Amino acid sequence: MASEFIGRAPELAVLAQRIEATARGCGSVVLLAGPAGIGKSTLAAEALRRHADRERVTVMRGHCPRDTVAPPLWPWQHALRVAGVTLAFPGPRSAEPTGAGAVAPQHQWSVTEPADAAAARFLELARMSEALAAAAAERALVVLLEDLHWADTASLDLLRQLTSEVTYRGLLVVGTFREPAPEEPAGALAELGRYGAETLRLAPFTPAEVAQCVGEADAAQFYRRTGGLPLLVSALRTHAGSLCTVVSGLLTGLTTEQRLVVRAAAVLGEPLDTDLLTPVLPQLEATAVSRALEAAWHAGILTAENSADTGRTYRFTHDLVREEVLGRTTPPASRALHQAAARALEQAGDPGEAARIAAHWRHSGTEPAHRAAAAHWSRTAADLARERHAYADAVRHLTDAAAVLDAADPQRASALIDLARAEYLVGDYDASLRHCDEACDAAKAKRRPALLAEAALVVQGVTYPHASQAITRLCKTALAVEDLEDAVRARVLAQLATVSADLGSLEEAAEQARAALELAEATGDARAELDAARALQMVLAHPDDTAERLRLGELAVSGAEQLGDPLVAVLGHQWRVQAGYLLGRLDLVDDAIRGIEAIADRSSLPLTRWHQLRVTAARAAQEGRFADARRCNADATELARAGADQYAITMSYVLQQQLALVRGDAAELCEEMWRDLDRAPENPLIQSMRARALFVAGRPDEARDAYERLRPLLPIPTANPTWPAVLLNLVDLIELAGDASVARLVYDQLAVFRPYPGALGTPTAYFSGTVSRELGRLALTAGRPAQAEELLREALIRNRALGARPYVALTCLNLATVERDKGALADAAALAGEAVAIADRLDLPGPSAAAARLLDEIAARRDDTGPLTPRERQIAELVVRARTNRQIADDLIISERTVESHVRSILAKLGYANRTEMTARWADH
């Protein structure tokens, strides 16, 4: 019988190539997959033994224990100790040993929004990724992660982060996982392929490979009995029978005392050492436990690993062996061992073992004291996971805690609220609301009214009908409590206002929000004031609310500074940006943008940087600095994708669409936009965005069809905060359709913005200049050209004052068309010439081409026998507008000498003595 490594030549070749590439600084992620016993770990070990030269690479190993009993990122931390990479985390808030009879303390969870949680999570993963990159820059690293099918969510998230980054780093990650894996890790592992990971799926040994292992004589029989599974082939080579028989054979050589140690080891879990196992078996001396572990190692039940930090530790040779040993332990003996293991781990005092301790208490029996201890340690493990931003792992631990607390337990309501908060942070809103309802019932049963408000405040900013109805029910239950503190009552009222608005009760929502703000300001509670301010800002839909929005923004900024909440401060500054733009107060806009930039520079949260990039992109687009706008948009989108924030990703499409519209270039649109718009919920805002995108993309027939589907929704209720955006999206479509009746209707709705000289828009999307331009276009479509001219001339003045150069060009083009149609060809030509000049300078290919066509039309309508060439006429139009030769040269992107030559030619052809005479008599032409 051969004892050398058998088979796996293709897989070994892949791993050899990847290890060699890593040593040269080109990393990768390789996953080894297959059923239990297929030889994943053996293959990885052999590849590293053969090809991982210690002179060139550092090899580290991490193991994912089953039953999620390790703290988040445990396999990474365990592996990285070898490389000297420290990933420090804050400790859990409460982790003192409590014993089975202790009462669990309150576990406080701050109410954090999912966007905040995602930002903090992304930051933590980015920090860890950078630490690994720094270590790999010093020396090539190979990290072997075993049993990823049991990995915590945080570990899988870090692996995904690294998978997209390792190509240019000296870092190879080799992971093993069992198939089929549980649903959640299976999905995460499958997704790694999109980021460049390669999965090698191992097949059972062939008959020929079995023959190599056991010899030709027994090959057929062994292959038939084992199916080629390497673990069984290897085991049955020396022990005949099934796995049960194999394990029996392995245990036979051990004494009764040593078998007891092995059973205790199977219950305790891994890794194993004498110090950890001895307290579980108080009837044995430490030396006896140590000898037993060594005997099990020599018998082939355990494997050993030596470390400078921890000394010798042991693991079962395979989890199937451990499962077989557990199956041989009677339930009473198992419960007693679990209880002893829980107490021993509590005594050890390692807070990172909280989940493991909880698991042992859960398996210790159903006594109330055991359930209370299990719940406490599960909540402590959840605290640790939350502080490491591993919110999905926190959900698992809190689910365990809630499961062991029966309805009579006084801690059940608070445990359910903790669970609901964790589910909210991972985006499982339905489950969160369900547990809020259960917590509400439990709080009422135990007469704990303060918890009713906590339950009502868990889910924030979620606005779909089922959620709004559930939150309304929770809020009204909490508000029925007579002695609710005023600050808490204000927060619940603010919460109720947000969902009332979502359910369409906008007047009621405004009343609730104002009542919340009045009550909050009376209490002086900063958090309550901020909640109320956000609720009220949501229902400010009329331009006359601008002063109130500005006040709320200033309130949010000052309150957020007091609370140290950078995201709320950013929101406050954004409300100031929006108000400042509409008022035409660019000084206010600049001050607010500087405030956001300062917060982004101070704060480590990616979400503050996202907001800073978005508001900067909007400002750049408004001023015609399109390269800056695209760069900020791309950087913001990268942050949004890293945080999987679909709303934030959508904002990038909105700006792309506006750039495409202003520049007249459909190449600004990306393919992903169409896919995501198709998946988005059907509402007027999304429908209008899609219709306008079709128009911008040069698909007019489809755009008209989309417009016809939107037409019956008009007029848009002006109590809905999105109504201006929907109507502004429709202006191009109304022009396209020539729909005079809808033009008049939309004009009447948007006219309320005319008293405000500034720009309309949203800080996270774009600003589109003054509304006067849109009103002028609508008036023209409605058949009111005189009114259109008045509005467009007003728009020209306002957009120039705003520095909105692209919209100045577009307004010139609109107004030139009006002047042409009424026969004022000189004014039309001058305006079209200005539009061409600005469009060419800003790179607006669509408006530039349209203005050039308009100039050609104007020239054609003039006296064809006129002496001036089209270029001379264009320059003459600018001369009579009092433009200097230098200004004309800059506008037309030609030399000043060329302009001088053209001016001399014009004067000679027309018989004028000088520019003054030409200006006075130009109307004759």
Image (cartoon, rainbow, N blue to C red):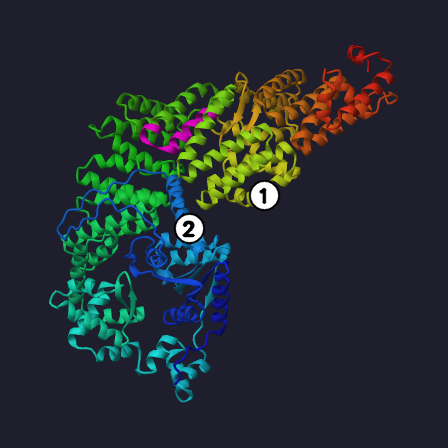
Which residue is found at the position 46% from the left and 74% from the top? 8
Element under label 1?
loop
* Residue behind mark 2: 129
Q: Amino acid at mark 1?
A: Cys
Q: Position of residue 775 (x, y in %)?
A: 60, 21
Q: Characterize the magenta stretch by its predominant secondary structure.
A: helix
Element under label 2?
helix
Q: Position of residue 836 (x, y in %)?
A: 71, 27
- Would you identify the image quadrant in which residue 740 lies? top right
In the rendered structure, does residue 563 fall within the stretch colored magenta?
Answer: yes
Q: Position of residue 275 (x, y in %)?
A: 19, 63
Q: Position of residue 666 (x, y in %)?
A: 64, 39
- Would you identify the image quadrant in which residue 535 lies? top left
Determine crowd level at label 2: few under 14, some 14-19, many 20+ residues with C-alpha closer than 10 A: some
Q: Is residue 840 left or right of residue 32?
A: right
Image position of 520 with respect to 915: above or below: below
Q: Quadrant of the N terminus?
A: bottom left
* Residue behind mark 1: 670
In the rendered structure, does residue 810 fall within the stretch colored magenta?
Answer: no
Q: Quadrant of the C terminus?
A: top right
Q: Amino acid at mark 2?
A: Ser
Q: Give the foreground label among 2 and 1.
A: 2
Residue at the limit of the structure toward the front, as seen here: 55
Give the camera-side residue of 792 and 215: 215
Q: Are marks 2 and 1 in contact (CB under 8 Å)?
A: no
Residue at the limit of the structure toward the left, as seen here: 283
Q: What range of the chain is rendered magenta?
A: 560-577
